Image: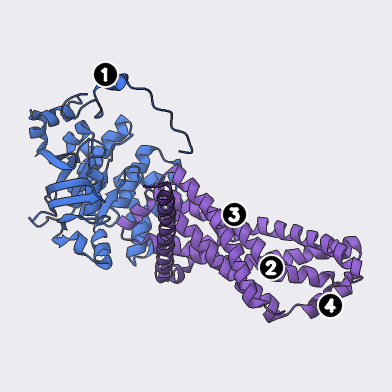
Chain colours: A purple, B blue
Amino acid sequence: MSRMQQILRQIGHQVTERLWRLGFASRFLLMTVLYSGTALKRFHLTIREIYFTGVLSLIIILVSGMFVGMVLGLQGYDTLQRYGSSEALGVLVALSLVRELGPVVAALLFASRAGSAITAEIGLMKATEQLSAMEMMAVSPIARVVAPRFWAGVISMPMLAALFSAMGVLGGYLVGVKLIGVDEGAFWSQMQAAVDFRQDIMNGVIKSFVFGVLVSWIAVFEGYDADPTAEGVSRATTRTVVTSSLAILAADFVLTAFMFRGI
Amino acid sequence: MRDIFLPALLPLIATSAPADPLVQIRDLNFAYDSRSILSGINITIPRGKVVAIMGPSGCGKTTTLRLIGGQLRPTSGEVRVAGQVVHECDDDGLYLLRRRMGMLFQFGALFTDMSVYDNVAFQMREHTNLPEELIHDLVLMKLHAVGLRGAYKLMPAELSGGMARRVALARAIALDPMLIMYDEPFAGLDPISLSIIGELIRTLNDALGASSIVVTHDVHESLKIVDYIYFVSEGKIVAEGTAEEIKESQAPYVHQFVWGEADGPVPFQYPARPYGEEMMEQPSKPRRWWS
């Protein structure tokens, strides 16, 4: 076999492997949705996971949101004052956060903090035969372990993104109004006039919901599909963060293209 | 020693069982892709008996348990449990069958985010509508049977290996199964824990009127408690018999295994080319991490 044939064969193998894995992951998502009865009927299982994935991610989300808003306040003021429109700082901070930075950065942080934890937990449960034990007890691990974690991620993500944006606006306010001295009335009134509920806030919520589905799906799938060894769990955790981050950024581009075209 | 266990087990004692075998494995073959793991396996597990499946690591013992539990599908042949062919059951049928089975995994496989109490109560809460007061009594009864009633508040991380195995055993018998499967129950235990687990396997089986399958390579502990033994080597049954027959056996493989001889039908050396030929060869380059 010539060198070229070998290369083509390897590429073909890699592509087939990726497609097969994508198909398997899609089937897994379908199964998770179909087996969600337990997670929704016994909602305390999902609430417990919301605590671990959502509530315990609050600190990193709130602190990051505050800092991102403060940086936006500084950078935004620097640009706007060149054109004599520093009163529009509130608009710049709010729109940047609600449309883009809130959903995207919160999702990236969520993938690193909660997504990796979900993958590691499910992967370790697999490695220590806890999932097999559950199957042998006639309890579906997808219904009992995967679905509550998946829905917890989907529910938590929009709330975390909203809190991130709120803290960002607060950070922008503190820097712009309290530190630099932008007029407080102009800051809030221009923001209120410019931010549209459906066009800006709802689109941001839709984005964060989609990111929540993506991150939770990738996290539970990677955990469930991890090789049951220390190395396998470590690789799966890394894959979750890398794949989720790329998926968030790619999905953000697609969603933005659909939502804000022509504006 | 049974005097220690029997009083705790009295509430669990079951009535007599039908005479047909509980598990029948016929002409069972199993392969991962093209790699054969089991070939032509025939095993019968009578009701009320404790049967051991022994053999060296990697010979297919755990695979046999997974085939009985329906976690794997045979390439050919069949496994019947209580008259039902396991691989022909649909998902609901398989889950119904598994509710009547208990399995003890090699290292317990306790749910690490739940306490000892919640681990034992897990199946009761999942499969029954029993009130919490009754579940409380049942959990304490099961834990009392394995001698760990006082440890019900502990988390799995706070248990020793032997204690974890006993909690897993209490969890395995939570719904009074007809079949209890043990995957290497003696692995890594100190002599006291080992003896306790051995005794519990026997006494729980008799008290519950269940049947037990013990997959192990611990010959001496197993011979004390089991009724019948199958020896598996390279995916085939190579010997079988009662504990006495096995002890007396002069078959080379059984003799080597029972008496722990380093060389025999199972060779000490991994298959290799002639020693001299290999020594004269140039050493191969060490494998790099990127290769």
- Dot 1: element: helix
Q: Earlier in the sequence, mark 3 or mark 2?
A: 2
Asked if disc 4 and disc 3 are in contact, CB closer than 8 Å, the reply is: no
- How far apart marks 3 and 2 lie (CA) works out to 18 Å
What is the total number of numbered labels drawn onto the structure image? 4
Mark 2 residue element: helix
Mark 4 or mark 3, which has the lower sequence index? 3
For label 4, the residue is: A189
| Pointer 2 chain | A
Q: Is residue B185 left or right of residue A219?
A: left
- Estimate the spatial distance between the alpha carbons at disc 4 and disc 2, rounded to whole Å: 21 Å
Q: Is residue A142 left or right of residue B193?
A: right
The amino acid pointed to by label 4 is Ser
Of badges 1 and 3, the one in the foreground is 1
Query: Residue tagged by mark 1?
Result: B276
Point out the image quarter for the C terminus of chain A.
bottom right
Which of the labelled discs sits on residue A100, or is there none?
Answer: 2
**Residue neighbourhood size for the residue with mark 1, other residues' Cα within 10 Å, grouped as few (<14), some (14–19), many (≥20):** few
Is residue A199 visible to the viewer in this orientation of the structure? yes
Whether labels 4 and 3 share one chain:
yes
